[in-house]
Image (tube, rainbow, N blue to C red):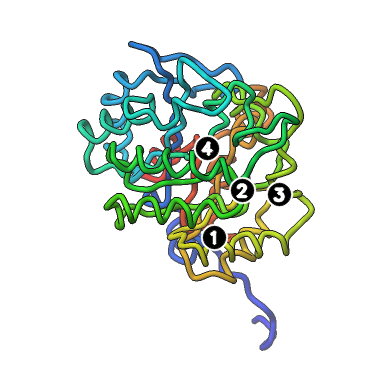
Amino acid sequence: MFPENRPRRLRQTETIRRMVRETHVRVDDLIYPLFVKEADALKEPISSMPDQFRYSPDMLPKVAKHIASLGIPAVLLFGIPRKKDSVGTQAHHKDGVVQQAIRQIKDAAPELAVITDVCLCEYTDHGHCGILDEKGNVINDDTLEVLSNVALSHAKAGADIIAPSDMMDGRVGVIRDALDEGGFENTAILSYAVKYASAFYGPFREAAGSTPSFGNRKAYQMDPANVREALREASLDVEEGADMLMVKPAMPYLDVIRVIADEFDLPLAAYQVSGEYAMIKAASQMGWLDEDAAILESATSIKRAGADMIITYFAQRLAELLR
């Protein structure tokens, strides 16, 4: 006989474990990032991100159909143009690489939501996220005009959601105005509201060719030490008309995800960035951890912290595991 007040643990079979689980990751939570490079018939491996590729737009129909078949509801597009200049001209060209990609995906898999990253770092020859003055400083207001043109060009091509990642002051409001005036009132904005100046972006910059040619982005991205700043940044974007918010990166900032989720009543995405992906892949390739278990555990931690959506390069594998 057990003493009357002795605590008991639930002895869990796998079925019971699933029944009482507090946090669930579902395929509907996932967003898959895609790198699109201006070329033809291209599927180019990314050396720092095993099993990830740069695709030319004409290769996307097959990719999009497969992603949709897994039940993943959305993709996030990053463009890599043939030509770059100091002001990112190709970012808002009507036949730019992302604009082509949107049309290809929408023709092949219309049920797939297309989210487009709006930033200039992949399109400028200096690799910074905005227009620069003669001293190499980003000119915030000049950049806003270009970003609004980029957002509008993506909406015209068929994008469902615009995701500004530049971290310029006021960009959500300017983009919202441009979309509304252009007749795209129903095109949503997923704001990179809380984007840290992180060491975990290295593989992405190699993949997108967006490493700054000088300096860094600490002047306009957030200090990793700050949480109250995250609340201020998110609040400004909410006031300007953001429909959804994002925290980036994810796992080093689980505490920030929790704070933002508790404070704001908007859908919240968290971006499991390239460095997070590369670490798990590298460790699993060395036999130091179980890759599938690490993928599931990391995604669960992001959901448990409060994210509604997870942007992750593991989305396809997660969808397979969750099914």
Q: Disc 4 versus disc 2: distance between alpha carbons?
A: 20 Å
How crowded pointer 2 is (Cα within 10 Å; few <14, some 14-19, many 20+) is rated as many
Q: Disc 3 versus disc 1: distance between alpha carbons?
A: 15 Å
Q: Position of residue 288 (x, y in %)?
A: 69, 29
Q: Which residue is mark 2?
A: 250
Q: Which residue is mark 3?
A: 222
Labels 3 and 1: the sequence-earlier one: 3
- Circle 4/circle 2 CB separation < 8 Å: no
- Left or right, 123 with reference to 69: right
Of 209 and 176, which appears nearest the observer? Answer: 176
How crowded pointer 3 is (Cα within 10 Å; few <14, some 14-19, many 20+) is rated as some
Labels 1 and 4: the sequence-earlier one: 4
Mark 4: amino acid: Cys
Q: Secondary structure at mark 4?
A: loop
Q: Position of residue 224 (x, y in %)?
A: 75, 49
Q: Which residue is mark 1?
A: 237
